[in-house]
Amino acid sequence: MIQDEVRKRQGLPETFPEWIQYHAQHRGARPAMREKDLGIWQTMTWEQLAQEASLLAAGLASLGLEVGQHVAIVGENRPRLYLAMMASQMLGAIPVPLYQDAVAQEMLHVLNDAQICIAVVEDQEQVDKLLEVEHESEALRYIIYDDPRGLRNYTQAHVLPYERLLERGTQYQAQHGAELKARTAAVRADDAAAMFYTSGTTGKPKGVVLTHHALIDRALAIQELENLTDAEEVLAYLPPAWIGQNMFSYTQFLVTGFTVNHPESPETVSIDMHDIGPSYYFAPPRVLEGLLTQVTIRMEDASAFKRWLYKHCMELAHKVGVKILNREAGVSAWQRALYSLGNVLIYAPLRNALGMSRVRVAYTAGEAIGPDLFDFYRSIGINLKQLYGSTETSVFVCVQEDGHVRADTVGPPVKGVELRVAESGEIQIRSPGLFKEYYRNPESTQESFTADGWYHTGDAGYLDTDGQLKIIDRAKDVGKLADGSLFAPKYIENKLKFFPYIKEAVAFGADQPQVCAFINIDLEAVGNWAERRNLPYAGYTDLAAKPEVYALIRDCVAQTNLDLATDPKLSGSQIASFLILHKELDPDDDELTRTRKVRRGFIAQKYSVLVEALFAGRERQFVETEVKFEDGRTGVISADLRIEKMGGRV
């Protein structure tokens, strides 16, 4: 390809091991990774990173890791887990990140499908999961752990601490240094670099094989688009097994050479955001929704004057903030002056409270974001942009460009991407970032492409007049009501989730005379609301059933219907009735994927009695639901749920 030839002429690396050596030579003393441990940030330079990754590769080789074999990486964002990925790639092996919150049986599917021979994990929790299912695993030989706490009395010979692997690596490197260098030099751009498993919304997760070329090409395209440099600061806080986080904190990190910071724990992310002040930030909509919920709770607890000031400043930001960020005309000098005052009083402190004072570029992806939520962040001066892609495309297919950011599009195709819309409305693409195959699944691989080589995204959308892509929904989910009106459930769900009191929503209506919805309340936000009104409750189920809470959520649904009424395409999709579920939707109960995407089909089947009651117009419905506890036990939650009717369309 032309891009490959240009890269070779520029002398740019073509594989991840080459990029590691490149940075060690060109910016060896600069910080590569930081980790917060016991409240103190520890720094690793690029030179130290290259040395330790090489030792770790030697240690893995001493365990018999061969070219093409798979290494599981399991845990939160930890430098040593990232180094394990690098070390595997240096040997021509393939790292396979797994979700750290997956239960043992979920991991077993990947262990056997990928024939995992070595697992590098974070701590005792992950070691215990693997020991639980190792007798069912077909290939697992060694488990390497990072954090030794709780593992002192584990005597199994195949369970090794990270330090022991480095010791083995030091000895092996002294004896086989030339062989190790030859293995690293033999890695090619078209070799598999990593394998990521799909979220499994429609069935068993599939292993998506991505090459060095595919991942690096997309990282270079975004580096050019956003003028990224090695001065960027990134916080790695999302699951490493998610391709979105992995692209930002691993692929782009190794290509651009910026610094990646690892928080002390998931609970300290907010504090660590303030410590670091990231300049390049990535968050799925659910994270942004959670941050907005925190802001709303804090403002409700503020004084009357602060609430008044916040309300009026946000009204101004809603009118002119996005235009000012986009450098658009139509904002008067007086409005700019008021906005500048609002920036001093509200917007800048708010950005600081969110840990986003230094953010230069922020992306959101993973699922569609509600326009209200998107505009909120942009209106207070945060350069939040949408991108569109998937695991199979190495993330970057479309990205919004500065000055051309709109809430209803995901931007134009990124450099190198070709895009077309089929007659069915499905988006199809060709890209240098496309995956190599689904591992050991040639049928699914073949089905993913058209006869003339275009990839089926499975998403429905269209190109706007200015070349920007609009996503309607997943093609399989877009349908029609009984009267022929368009029904796009994800669009409706996102509107509902803009409200801080609604954590999750599932809309139903395809081929039905009306739209109905399940609602999950946000326990923290609604709990705070209830406490300020002296409304007692004994947990989620009790709070969700309160008449006062139903009235609160009814107001949110009514406002959603008002917004839908103004949309000519979706005015027929107003919500006719809803219920508040008696339990939170949970990945452990298979209701959400590990990336917290709604498994709508599974939910419709599991709660079919509730779906039937909604469309039948009943006022109440009893339901019993089996749930899984963290220790593996199962139980049953039962409730008599109230169904709230909204009346006719607006």
Image (cartoon, rainbow, N blue to C red):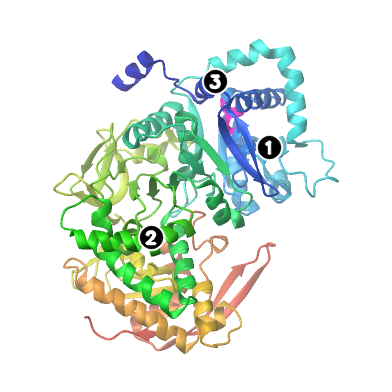
**From the viewer's perspective, is 128 left or right of 101?**
right
Q: Quadrant of the N terminus?
A: top left
Closest to the camera, between mark 1 and mark 3, is: 3
**Given contact means CB atoms under 8 Å apart, are the residues at marks 1 and 2 in contact?**
no
What is the secondary structure assignment of the residue under circle 3?
A: helix
Q: In the image, what residue type sits under mark 1?
A: Leu
For residue 344, which numbered disc appears in the image?
A: 2
Residue 319: percent from the left, percent from the top?
24, 65
Residue 290: percent from the left, percent from the top?
47, 63
The residue that mark 1 highlights is 140
Q: Work out whether residue 564 or residue 289 is closer to the camera in this orientation and state it.
A: 289
Q: How many marks?
A: 3
Part of the protein shown in magenta:
85-89
Residue at horizontal 64 percent and vertical 72 percent from the top: 635
Query: Counting residues from the N terminus, which is met first, the one under dot 2 or under dot 3?
Result: 3
What is the secondary structure assignment of the residue under circle 1?
A: loop
Query: Counting residues from the N terminus, which is met first, the one under dot 1 or under dot 2?
Result: 1
Tell me: residue 566, above or below residue 354: below
Q: Toward which corner of the image does residue 490 lie, by quadrant?
A: bottom left
Q: CA distance from mark 2 to mark 3?
A: 45 Å
The residue that mark 3 highlights is 21
Q: In the image, what residue type sits under mark 3?
A: Gln
Residue 58: percent from the left, percent from the top?
68, 22
